[in-house]
Image (tube, rainbow, N blue to C red):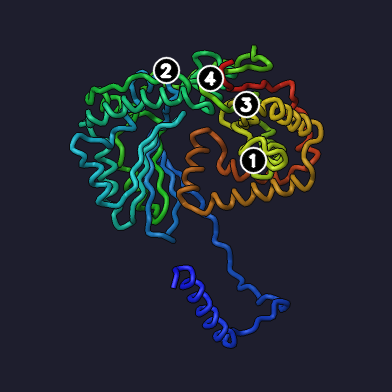
Amino acid sequence: MSPMSLSFGLLFSLSGVASAQDTRIPAYDDQAPPPAAEEVAPKPKAVPAIWTVSEGTEAVLVEDHRVPEVVLVVEIPVGTYSPWLNAQHGVEAWELQMYDAEGALRARADALAADLSVYCEARTCTLELVALKRDLEASVALVQDVLKNTSYDKAELKRTDQGRKIGWEGSQTDPDWRLSQTTAQLLYTEGDPRLQSYVEPEKVLRDPKALAAARDAALRLPGRRVGFAGDLTRAEAEAIAATLLPPVNPVTPADLAPAYLPLRADRPASLIEPMDNLTQIYFALMRDGITLEDPNYPAFLVANHVLGGHFFSRLYVSLRHEGGETYGAYTRGGGGATASVYSLSTFTRVENKATTEAKLRAVLTTFHEGGVTEQERIEAIGYLQGSELFDQQSPSNLLSTTLTELTLGLPPGFFVEATKRASALSTEEINTFIKAHYDPAAFSMVTVEPEP
């Protein structure tokens, strides 16, 4: 018997078994009303506790005992935008402190099955550890030892230096990265810290003693925070926070804060960035985006979602679903702590350039002239409200949001309140914002395309 015959024979045999069992399956009336749902009181939303540990040090706790897991965060108030931190090679000093020469720190984290991450962002540098509650004492000791490490692994320093070089060279062959670089260069003045991600990185400092000194200086800056989330009490958090960090140095460097420069006023209406070996064209119809503290930020949340924030957005429908010119069309940026590049972006084959550019511009023009519909507003609000609820489910997410609000100087509950404000806006109010902000004359067309 062939394998196919055997398969069909087995299929029919199983069908017979299923038929024989059908008489034992109870019948259901699909027209009957569903049983009444059991009323369950909603779980009260955790309210972050915030207190001063000592001068220059603040603590945040999101207490949640549903899961025996603890999140511990150490955040210092300086990041990649800081001239001082960059001059001290503080980014690698912070990010590589868990790499001791013997590998003992990472081995201890592995033995605890703890997730230990150390990273720097624009305004902060962070150490974050996630571990089981039963390992809390050992986890705190590990964090303290990481923050005291002076034996930076020279092999890891060399690998990181080489990785920076390879990463930079690779970015030059990535058309999407080149598009982001070009739009940023059109928006920001040369020397602005917001351009830092788009310039060739410096070599990694390979002096463990100097790196440890830079890390120690950054760790002692006032304005630092210790965050806790999960299965621990206020008393436990207070005891840990009181002894976790060294004393603050009240004297801060003069060049600690980033110096943002005025946005460029000479942005051209269009710009082509040529690139070798391309078979596609990448588009960004861009302008400067609004900030978090702009009064129109809630209206922006709705408008941005409708225009390019989901699979059936205006951009997706026009450029993917209707014409198939691209696999992806979306909006990027906007709504940051400072002005950032905001763009309508897509990509297509070279032969589709004219059609795709015309459609991209037409979507913006139609959006500017007609705004959103009432149905689009309702759907966008539903998305925003659902996303906000989802973001509040995890104590670690709530801790992250609270730390972000504190870092940016935003009032507590800013993001929740922004969703509420967006939900209260009428279609007319949103369209008034769209009429002002989405004027095609304010946008520049940037493309990355093959060399002529």
- Circle 2 — which element? loop
| Front label number (3 vs 2) | 3
| Residue pointed to by mark 4 | 275
Tell me the element at label 1: loop
Q: Nearer the viewer, mark 4 or mark 3?
A: 3
Disc with the residue nearer the chain's start (2 vs 4):
2
Tag 3, which secondary structure? helix
- Earlier along the polypeptide chain: callout 4 or callout 3? 4
What x and y, as percent, mark residue 385? 64, 50
Say which of marks 2 and 1 sits in front.
1
Residue type beneath disc 3:
Val
Mark 3 and mark 2 residues within 8 Å of each other at the beta carbon: no
Residue position marked by numbered label 1 in the rendering? 309
Q: Pointer 2 and pointer 1: residues touching (CB < 8 Å)?
A: no
Circle 4 packing at 10 Å, graded few (<14), some (14-19), many (20+), is: some
> Disc 4, disc 1: CB below 8 Å?
no
First of labels 2, 1 by sequence position: 2
| C-alpha distance separating marks 3 and 1 | 25 Å
Front residue (pair 168, 398): 168
- According to the picture, the residue beneath numbered tag 3 turns out to be 350
Query: Whole-percent x and y of residue 47?
Result: 51, 51
Picture quadrant of residue 300: top right
SS class, disc 4:
strand
Checking the image for residue 255, the label placed there is 2
